[in-house]
Image: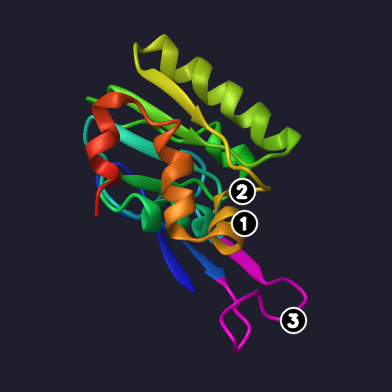
Amino acid sequence: MIAAVTDGAGVLQGVHRTWLAPNGQEKAAVEIPRRAMGHLLGNAVRIAPADQTLVLGEGIETMLSVREAAPSLPVWAALSSSHLGAVILPAGLQRLYIAIDRDPAGQRAAERLTARASEVGVQVIVLEPQLGDFNDDLRAHGVEALRQHLAAQIGSEDQHRLKI
């Protein structure tokens, strides 16, 4: 899987590559199944463009899972917890949903990003998975269960984005 890492103007800044197993269900059995190159810090894999709302999380698979359950939500992947705390937020952003991973690094990144967003007046809501991340949730429970889990956490102004 190859993903473009772009800046706010849409200019290519880097590339993220993930080697997948032939069955497509897991990473390939290679020494380092994920590699990225280029200028990543501050940039993201923009799966869907942001408007006044954005869902930002760490991994591509995690954010594709959120997008699968909520196809109208704009989602970006920061590629790691350290990059999550440093993504440059788009102008005009009003609500930021942070799709955390359930680990200490994910919690710390969400705290850094929350502080940065709050300083510029952006409302922040942290989305928590049931398992390790939202990709784990999707794989274990299915798309409808993930949609319902997100619906319980998404603000009322964005509930319409969960409809298919």
Determine which residue is flagged by label 2: 133
Region in magenta = 18-36
Mark 2 near mark 3, Cβ–Cβ under 8 Å? no
Residue at 54% x, 38% y: name it: 84
Mark 2 near mark 1, Cβ–Cβ under 8 Å? yes
Residue at 43% x, 44% y: name it: 148
Q: Amino acid at mark 2?
A: Asp
Q: Amino acid at mark 1?
A: Asp
Using the image, determine if residue 23 lies above or below residue 60: below
Residue 22 location (% of width, % of height): 60, 89
Q: Amino acid at mark 3?
A: Ala
Quarter that holds the C terminus: bottom left
Measure the alpha-carbon separation of dots 1 and 3: 19 Å
| Residue 20 in which image quadrant | bottom right
Determine which residue is flagged by label 3: 29
Tell me which numbered mark, 2 or 3, is placed earlier along the sequence: 3
Tell me which numbered mark, 1 or 3, is placed earlier along the sequence: 3
Determine which residue is flagged by label 1: 136
In the visual, does 102 lie left or right of 16?
A: right
Whether residue 62 is visible: yes
